[in-house]
Amino acid sequence: MMNWRVLLMSFVRRGNLKSIYKQNLERQYEGTEVTIKCEMQENAMKIFQFHVQNNPKYREFLDSKGFDYHNLKNIIWENIPIITKDDLRKYYPEIKSETYNYTSSGGSTSIPLQYPASKESALFIWPAHWTMQQICGGRPYDKILMLMAYGNVKKTITKRIYHALSNFYTFNSFTMTEKQMENMCELIQNKEIKFIYGYSSAINQFLRFLKIKNIILPLKGIFTTSENKINSSYSLARDYCHCDVFDQYGAHDGDVFAFECEEHAGLHILHDWSTVEVINNEIILTAVKNKAFPFIRYQVGDVSLGEKLITEKCKCGRTLFRLKGISGRNTYFVKDIDGREVSVMLFTYPFDSDYNILQYQVVEENGELRVNFITDKYTKEQLIDLYMPFILSKLKRPVDFMVNQHIYKLPNAKVPLFYKISQ
């Protein structure tokens, strides 16, 4: 039975969240390898045809690639051009009549993008989270402690109301001081919170704090995201929280949501929302419900640990296709001068919301920290005026800003948010 929060939030969001959640639960165990593959292809082709027929800016992009889309019945999916964030910025192929809200991406890819979402695309996010939480007995809008980025902790009145209705208790993942972690323990006990969701690095810091203080804090489940999973978190969670850790991969710009189950044998993909391809380990996404913006064969910037999707039925019983894992996500700390560890995800908050910054990268060399910005709008001095006060409010160590310098890549060709030059 759904609780009143689901009904109220469905009314506020103008959509049936209960129905989406129910569909996700049922679809986890339905289908065969053949039927799921067919569904993913049909869903992807359907949204492609919609944008070809209704989106002149998307057609302009296809024209620029020399792609003939006039005979839709004879289109070969693999021949459709891959679209990048640069392409989407250049053409900005929005269908305003389909736009429900706007959001932004960047995070671990360090390439900011603001984009619109249609209603179905926007509404699936939290029912997807509930589907994951159900693995360990979670229900919609159970109390959950959120280790969030700075922007989500600094709440407007609207955000405070939303978090209260959602049963979120938020802490800043970039200020994991002993005092904050003590406050987290107290809140979890007093409010009887049973779930934690947040950055892998911040959760690992909290679990190490529990070990150092020898605190037992029983929970039902811990969900990590945005960064590479940290293997030590699994044993720490079992020892000090008596629960399991489940890694989650999501990219709302491609509407992908994938999560570990109790078998920890890959990330289950909710394919009703995103058709996922793996090409030379590169993750390519098609947001099959987003009629406002064509994330079609979209190069999201993430790299798969596997060369292809895992299509076999999982031991847990789910038939959902799986990603083996995600390579090149950021699980890095920088040491402040007082010894405190600060996640490099700190840098995603101020820069991801500025769309005059095309890309950025944090580099550490010989103990010196610098941020390199790719931009044709700002000088170094302007960036210092805009963003240095925020950075220095979180870090005591010196940070330098650079403009349009060399961007470092990993061996897998992914551009990491943080790159350390070893001597």
Image: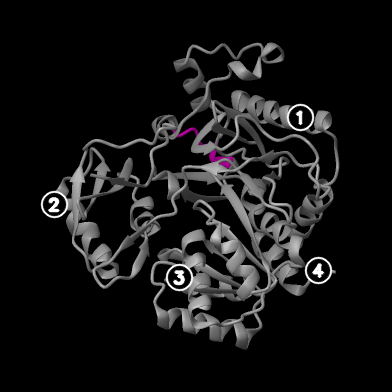
Q: Position of residue 400 (x, y in %)?
A: 18, 54
| SS at badge 4 | loop
Is tag 3's residue or tag 1's residue first in the polypeptide sequence?
Answer: 1
Q: Is mark 3 on a helix, strand or loop?
A: helix
Number of other residues with Cα within 10 Å of mark 3, as a class: few under 14, some 14 to 19, many 20 or more:
some
Q: In this view, does 171 lie above or below 262?
A: below
Quote the CA–CA distance across marks 3 and 1: 40 Å
Q: Quadrant of the N terminus?
A: bottom right
Badge number at residue 2: 4
14 or 84: which is nearer to us? 84
Q: Name the residue under label 1.
A: 37
First in sequence: mark 2 vs mark 3: 3
**Is residue 153 on the magenta stretch?**
no
Q: Mark 2 points at which residue?
A: 381
The span picked out in magenta is 92-97
In space, the residues marked 2 and 3 are separated at their CA atoms by 28 Å
